[in-house]
Amino acid sequence: MREIKVGVLGLGVVGSGTVRILQENAEEIAQRAGARLVIKKIAVRDVTKTRAVSVDPALLTDNPCEVIDDPEVDILAELIGGVDPAHDYVLRAIRNGKNIVTANKEMMAKSGHDLMEAAGAANRDFFLEGSVAGGIPILTAVKESLAANRIREIIGIVNGTTNYILTKMTEEGANFASVLAEAQAKGYAEADPTSDIDGFDAQYKIAILASMAFNSLVPVDSVAAQGIRGVTARDIAVAKDLGYHIKLTAVARQDGMGGMQVRVNPALLPLSHPLANVNGVMNAIVLRGDAVGEVMFYGPGAGSLPTGSAVVGDMIAVARNIVMGSTGRIGCTCFEKKRMLPIADVETKFYVRVLAADRPKALASIAGVFGDNDVSIESIVQRVQPDGDAEIVWVTHKIREANLRAALETIQTLPAVRAVSNWIRVEE
Ligand SMILES: NC(=O)c1ccc[n+]([C@@H]2O[C@H](COP(=O)([O-])OP(=O)(O)OC[C@H]3O[C@@H](n4cnc5c(N)ncnc54)[C@H](OP(=O)(O)O)[C@@H]3O)[C@@H](O)[C@H]2O)c1
């Protein structure tokens, strides 16, 4: 059987899962691909490090150019992460005629477009399934199985760390800081959790996914990203009482008039929402297409073998194309240029929690400000607290964020108002 040589950059979490799958499922992979996938070389930083998978030490190098410039390598898997130097390595590999597989969301969200164009111009494959939802095959579904649809809307839970933290807060009534510390101790959160907690990881992922689903490049810096630091145990408890769970959502919607909203934010989801009970580190994505209707993808959004599954799946797709002489079949699909809606203009329902003095007319004064700013109200719940103050929770109808912000600016200056404790979007 024909051999196709694979070069790998990186043998960390994803690299070792990828290599393990190539080793353990070699026979099935060869039959499915129509060729044997043989690892030619693996670049790492430190060749002496103990690895999670056993590899012939002769395969390892600390010089990535030995992989990128090897004329026998047909498929280059970039699994080192980050933009620099990964971007330059991948570009050089494309110029050397390699097909590319990557799981690098940051590189793809920040500077993936030119890489895909370069690969397309060279008639080479460029696949990135592992970059958006780990083991969940969402990009292939969007590009191939659902290619008949106009995709109007995507809403997903695409970050396992934040979903784990919010699930624990919901189940145990615990506060954010203590659950984060526990997640770090268990290895579910990084020592520096910023990328997950502040929504950047999800921002990269939804920028990539929306670009593919809407056929229009979504610049990552135009994706408003808000993380979960501001979500309190009290918000979760109040939301629960109202029939909602709070999740970190990545949302992309088209308005049908050439406008797109793409954003990451915590949101209240009604318990009947398909994502409301996606718990722990699991990820899920709901996608609405004009022909298919609603489809949901659920699974592990990260991890060594799940992400390795996506990477090796991509390699098999490349190998099939190499065998048939058809690489470069599906290139970059951002052939339209749609407008990004500013976050201030994005309309959703909102949850607003206010602490106020429990005195006559306090509620009326707040309601008056909402009215002045075209913020219409769906429901109000007022509870008197043990200290005698009133906690008032409002759920608005669909309104522009700018209107809510304007109202809250005035509300926090009202004499009866102690604090605007929080406001969070509500999805339907
Ligand atoms: N972890 C996940 O579950 C997951 C899920 C989906 C996507 N991803 C993406 O997959 C990529 C890899 O993530 P990971 O978690 O596997 O990272 P990781 O565990 O930190 O592994 C990175 C690997 O790359 C090597 N490396 C880093 N810089 C290098 C350089 N300049 N030259 C040569 N080798 C270099 C490291 O070598 P040493 O081992 O010698 O230090 C290490 O083997 C990232 O883009 C990440 O966003 C990860």
Image: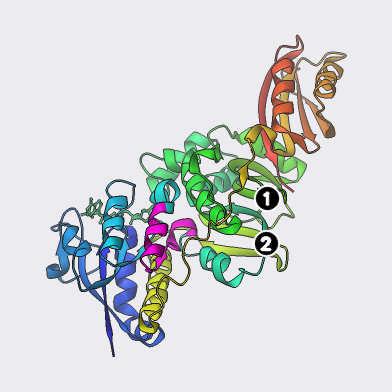
Q: Which residue type carries mark 2?
A: Arg
Marks 1 and 2 sit apart, C-alpha to C-alpha, by 10 Å
The image quadrant in which ligand 1 is located? bottom left
**In percent of the image, x 38 and y 88: which residue is there?**
31
Q: Which residues are magenta?
A: 114-133
Q: Are marks 1 and 2 in contact (CB under 8 Å)?
A: yes
Coloring basis for residues = rainbow
- Looking at this view, is 248 or 418 the one in front? 248
Left or right of 299? Residue 126 is left
**Main secondary structure of the magenta stretch:** helix
Q: Classify 10 Å Cα crowding around label 1: few (below 14), some (14-19), many (20 and above).
A: many
Left or right of 347? Residue 133 is left
User: Where residue 332 sits: x, y (%)?
Assistant: 48, 60
Q: Which residue type carries mark 1?
A: Gln
Residue that mark 1 sits on: 254
Residue 267 picture quarter: top right
- The total number of labels drawn is 2
Left or right of 23? Residue 147 is right
- Looking at this view, is 418 or 373 the one in front? 373
Residue that mark 2 sits on: 150
User: Where residue 354 sits: x, y (%)?
Assistant: 72, 24
